[in-house]
Amino acid sequence: MTTNAALTFKAVLFLAVLPLLLACLALAAGFRPAVAQTAPAGGGAREVLSLGWQAGYCAARPKSRGCADFSVDAPAARQFSLLSRFQLRKSYCGVEAGLKQQARKGKWTELPDIVLASGTKVRLMAAMPAARLGLDRQQWLRSGSCVAASPEVYYSRSLDLLDALNASPVRALFAQKAGAAITLAEVRAAFDAAFGAGAGERVRLICRKTDGGPVVTGLTIGLAGDAPTLADRIAAASPTKSRCTEGATGAGQAG
């Protein structure tokens, strides 16, 4: 006769091995348990804000269509311009193949127009000189489609970040160095002063080689998270290395 103690022992043993039996059956049926994903350090997607320094760009590429009417007296000569804001290793998210091909090799002004609030449109045309060549349309398809739900959200946020930089000691440094050379160390120190210790380590100089030496045509800033301020988004990003460490700022007037 089976005793109560023996029955109790068998019940405990069955309950102990039940999870293992269920797991084996699930795996045999092809089931794979969901694995929790961890957010990147700092939270949110990692992005790069790419900005141009028009005076340097036009000094390095004077025959570029975007430099046809460039003037050292224009506001664009003394402030950064918007090029792009993108996620690493992502592009043309949800863009159909034909439109993607057109954006890559076609005439940008023939791409579909983007819908922006009137105020955002005015800001963008002032902040992105190449928008008149269709860069705003191309960059929305290439980069914005992976970053924001609409062109309005993409560009209004990008312009806010650009405005924060142009109101900082970084822009002042570039303006003061007009016509002279600038170093990565100087730029990074200005970022630290403007946006907090370590901010400069998230910055790269964009340079172009010329017969007269390298010319700084812009810079990139690492961003992460979804904080409202440029300083917080820079702080959440990872440090980076810059191949270019010094270059001329291009012709311009200090101010």
Image (tube, rainbow, N blue to C red):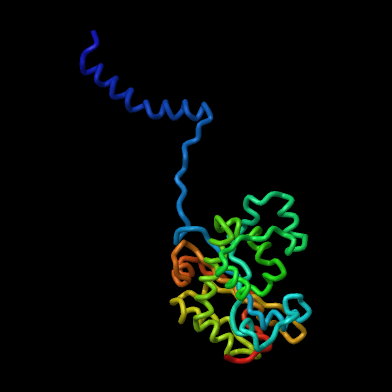
> Residue at left 28%, top 24%?
12
Question: Residue at left 45%, top 45%?
Answer: 36
Q: Is residue 136 above or below residue 68?
A: above
Q: Is residue 49 visible?
A: yes
Residue 189 in percent (x, y) is at 50, 82
With 108 as the anchor, is 166 left or right in this view?
A: left
Q: Position of residue 126 (x, y in %)?
A: 61, 76
The answer to which of 59 and 65 lies nearer the viewer is: 65
Q: Nearer the viewer, residue 15 or 48?
A: 48
| Residue 242 in sight in this render | no
Left or right: where does residue 191 sit relative to residue 122? left
Q: Nearer the viewer, residue 121 or 100?
A: 121
So how many labels did they put on this image?
0
Q: Residue at x 57, y 57 (%)?
A: 150
Residue drawn at x 47%, y 62% as measured from the top left: 225
Q: Which quadrant holds the N terminus?
A: top left
What is the quadrant of the C terminus in the image?
bottom right
Q: Position of residue 115 (x, y in %)?
A: 61, 60
- In the orientation shown, which residue stands out farthest toward the top? 1
Residue 43 percent across, percent down from the top left: 45, 59
Q: Nearer the viewer, residue 194 or 123?
A: 123
